[in-house]
Image (tube, helix red, strand yellow):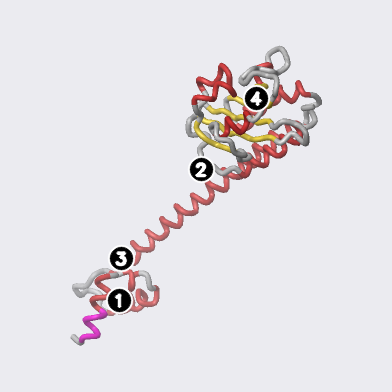
Amino acid sequence: MSGDTEKLKGEILRDPALILDDPDLMAALLSKQAETQGRNVVDLRSIAMSRMEERLDRLEQNYQTVVSAAYENLTGTNQVHRAILCLLDVDDFTGFLQALDHDIPNILGVDAIRLCLEDDNAKGGEEIGPDGPLKHLVMALPRYGVAAYVNGGINKHPAQVTTRPTNEAKEAVYGDAAVDIQSEALLRLDLGDGKLPGMVAFGSEDPHHFTADQGADLLSFFGHALERIMRHWVT
């Protein structure tokens, strides 16, 4: 056996994929095997079929992952669109709050929603909604309270959307419901020139419903729509 042949053999033994992943080489080997059928040789057809099955399995898994991600994205888009249309359909602030309290949680699959408004004169964590069953829905935060809650007390401009597990400060936002809320999505609201900012908090009892690495595009879109709707009601 020549030195070149030995070198080629060594390369193949170190990395058999050099042959098994090359369709032209496999075709030539299978053709040669057909001529020598019956001799004491390795069945290369079974090896090739095994490799093809592995590749098909990987392709199927990738396909399922892509389809699942696309379906989840489409479902999320439809949910956000339905929620926005629901809020656009109300005629007054009471109807807006009723939608936030009942319809929107059902559409988006969350357990609690709170509208938080900064107020120079209100005590943080105070319920300032209209008297009655919707009073708990609107919570007061002191000036700079949105940034403080979102950033954990760090004085910097908060992100437009923040998704995360809840922390010990959650009672200031969710009130009596805070004990059950384990994760949250926070949407900062720009309510217009001359107005203090606000925030909408989506709370979930599932600690994994909102996570720090979650995509925020749909929530950002919902937040921008919501702040424009809110400008009609907040003076």
Who comes first in sequence, dot 2 or dot 4? 4
The mark found on residue 47 in the picture is 3
Secondary structure of residue under mark 3: helix
Locate residue 43 relative to residue 137 in the image: left or right: left
* Residue range highlighted in magenta: 3-8
State the predominant SS element of the stretch in magenta. helix
Q: Residue at x 70, y 25 (%)?
A: 99
CA separation in Å, label 1 and label 4: 83 Å
Q: Nearer the viewer, residue 220 or 156?
A: 156
Real-space Cα separation, disc 2 to disc 4, in angstroms? 29 Å
Name the residue rendered at 68%, 26% in the picture.
Answer: 118
Does the magenta run of residues contain 6? Answer: yes
Check contact, mark 1 vs mark 2: CB within 8 A: no
Q: Secondary structure at mark 4?
A: loop
Q: Amino acid at mark 2?
A: Asp
Checking the image for residue 34, the label placed there is: 1
Which residue is identified by label 2? 213
Tell me how far mark 3 sits from mark 1, CA to CA.
15 Å
